[in-house]
Image: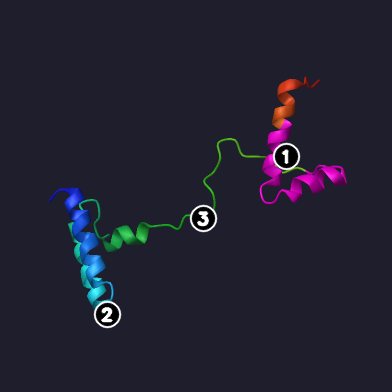
Amino acid sequence: MPFEESQRRITRAASRHCHHESADNEKYINAGIADDRDTYELTPAEFRQLRPVRGRPRSEAPKQRITIRLSPDVLAKFKAAGKGWQTRLDLALRDWLKTHRVR
């Protein structure tokens, strides 16, 4: 069965039966999974090998933690813009480096 037709069948079945009891829902969900050629049930061994993914992926060029002293007004302006102020500060410094020589 072509993939698109399989998706249409799953969608139709779900919309017709989503109001039934959870046991019925489980039956239709499992039928949809069985129709999906890209989905399969993991074996117990495969399931045991799964590991939770936590946090962000590791960067190839991780940023360094430093201590820096900034003027209160400069810090207040960056923080006032909300989350991501440290990233914006980093970008501002990168932009400054494009036009200035550092000895």
Q: As drawn, is 74 to the left or to the right of 44?
A: right
Q: Examine the residues drawn in magenta and state their main secondary structure.
A: helix
Tell me the quadrant of the picture where the C terminus can be found.
Answer: top right
**Could you tell me residue 33's position as x and y percent?**
23, 60
Label 3 residue SS = loop
Q: Mark 2 or mark 1, which is nearer to you?
A: 2
Foreground pick, 82 / 57: 82
Tally the marks.
3
Label 3 close to label 1 by CB (< 8 Å): no
Specify the segment rendered in magenta: 67-93
Judging by the rendered image, the residue that carries numbered circle 2 is 21
Q: Residue at x 74, y 27 (%)?
A: 96
Mark 2 Cα within 10 Å, few/some/many (few <14, many 20+)?
few
Q: Mark 3 or mark 2, which is nearer to you?
A: 2
Judging by the rendered image, the residue that carries numbered circle 3 is 54
Judging by the rendered image, the residue that carries numbered circle 1 is 89
Visible in this render: residue 83?
Answer: yes
Mark 3 Cα within 10 Å, few/some/many (few <14, many 20+)?
few
Label 2 close to label 1 by CB (< 8 Å): no
Label 2 residue SS = loop
**Could you tell me residue 52's position as x and y percent?**
45, 58
Q: Residue at x 12, y 51 (%)?
A: 1
Q: Amino acid at mark 1?
A: Leu
Which comes before the other along the chain, label 2 or label 1? 2
Q: Mark 3 or mark 1, which is nearer to you?
A: 1
Q: Residue at x 81, y 42 (%)?
A: 68
CA gap between label 2 and label 1 equals 53 Å
CA gap between label 3 and label 2 equals 34 Å
Q: Amino acid at mark 3?
A: Arg
CA gap between label 3 and label 1 equals 26 Å
